[in-house]
Image (cartoon, rainbow, N blue to C red):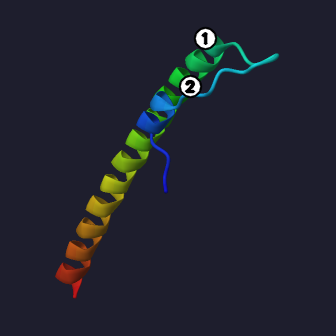
Amino acid sequence: MAITAQDIEQKTFSEAKKHGYDTDEVDDFLDTLASEVGAMLGKIKELHDRLQASDQQLAAAQAQVA
């Protein structure tokens, strides 16, 4: 199962009983991480779409040559 930006944004942790992490810091980090992951996934999709378009153009050019 792939993790999404939304999965990161919605992740919650139980309260630590002793010496746990600062929940505000964890939330801020998860927000930043979700934003970065979302941007990277968007870039991956953009590059995938461009690759498919290039593959189609190549196939069309090869068909014309043949």
Q: Which residue is mark 2?
A: 30
Q: Which residue is mark 1?
A: 24
- Please report whichever mark, 1 or 2, sits nearer to the chain's N-terminal start: 1
Q: CA distance from mark 1 to mark 2?
A: 10 Å
Q: Is residue 47 left or right of residue 49?
A: right
Residue at left offset 24%, top offset 68%: 56
Please, what secondary structure does the residue beneath circle 2 have? helix
Q: Is residue 14 left or right of residue 60?
A: right
Q: Is 24 placed above or below 7 here?
A: above
Q: Amino acid at mark 2?
A: Leu
Q: Quadrant of the C terminus?
A: bottom left
Q: Nearer the viewer, mark 1 or mark 2?
A: 1
**Closest to the observer, 54 or 25:** 25
Label number found at residue 65: none
Image location (x, y in percent) of residue 4: 45, 42
Q: Is 11 placed above or below 48 here?
A: above
Residue furthest to the bottom = 66
Image location (x, y in percent) of residue 33: 55, 28
Neighbourhood count class around disc 2 (C-alpha, 10 Å): few under 14, some 14–19, many 20 upward: some
Q: Is 65 placed above or below 3 here?
A: below
Q: Is residue 27 left or right of residue 64?
A: right
Residue at left offset 62%, top offset 26%: 14
